[in-house]
Image (cartoon, grey):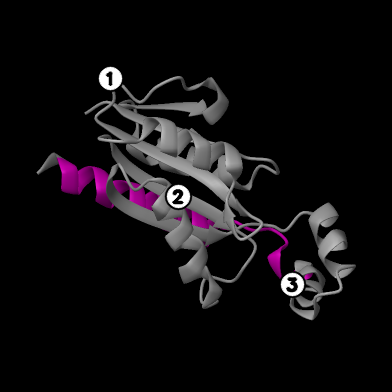
Amino acid sequence: MKVLVTYYTQTGNTKRVAEAICDEIGDSAESKALADVESLDGYDLAFVGFPIMAFSPAKPAKDFLEAHAAGKRVALFITHAAAEENEILDEWVAKCKDAAAGAELVGTFNCQGELSEQVAELLAGSEDPGLREFGQARQETLGQPDETRLAKARAFASEIVETLKD
């Protein structure tokens, strides 16, 4: 099975998850930055990763999925600064799945990443109390994704690949 692991990252969080996924899959996986991928043709499976930005999939990833995912077997991996048990994630992940609506979506993984200092400062200065609180909680995101989250990403990748081999 020929597998592509492609990602869009700004701070390195999503790239770290992509590397964990690619390492788990092994030699049958090819890793590329999203900007370097022109098509999903020729791949049996594509893991597409990106961060949540402004409560939605990052625009480059959304545009890529809408343009190239139709009819392709895709697994999404998503990073964000929220704790995984935060109820708002359901809404954010749903928007990500909507961007891949034309794909054969075989799985979705999401995990917390580190909120950048610049974004935290921007949020902390917001007039919206919820955004301010989110920005002030940056300390809780430092060091994410940690090894536990990366291990979950590897397990996700392994499960998807094994399921599709059957």
Given residues 30 and 104, the one toward you in this image is 104
Q: Is residue 135 above or below residue 101?
A: below
Please give the label number shown on residue 134: 3
The amino acid type, in three-letter code, at marker 2 is: Phe
The amino acid type, in three-letter code, at marker 3 is: Phe
Magenta highlight on residue 146: yes
Q: Is residue 58 above or below residue 117?
A: above
- Rendering quarter of residue 26: top left
In the drawing, does residue 71 fall left or right of residue 116?
left
x and y percentages locating residue 25 in the rendered image: 33, 37
Q: Which residues are magenta?
A: 139-164
Residues packed near mark 2 inside 10 Å, few (<14), some (14 to 19) or many (20 plus)? many
Instruction: Name the residue: 80% across, 80% down.
Output: 129
x and y percentages locating residue 83 in the rendered image: 58, 71
x and y percentages locating residue 98 in the rendered image: 40, 53
Quadrant location of the N terminus? top left
Instruction: Name the residue: 62% across, 57% down.
Output: 113
In the drawing, does residue 83 fall left or right of residue 130?
left
Task: Say if residue 93 shows up in the picture.
Answer: yes
Contact, mark 1 vs mark 2 (Cβ under 8 Å) = no
Distance (Cα) linking label 1 and label 2? 21 Å
Contact, mark 3 vs mark 1 (Cβ under 8 Å) = no
Residue indicated by mark 2: 77
Q: Which secondary structure lies at badge 3?
A: helix
Instruction: Name the residue: 53% across, 30% down.
Output: 34
Given residues 39 and 14, the one toward you in this image is 39
The rendered magenta stretch, by its main secondary structure, is classed as: helix
Distance (Cα) linking label 2 and label 3? 22 Å
Question: What residue occupies the far right of the structure in this picture?
Answer: 125
Residue indicated by mark 1: 42
x and y percentages locating residue 161 in the rendered image: 24, 43
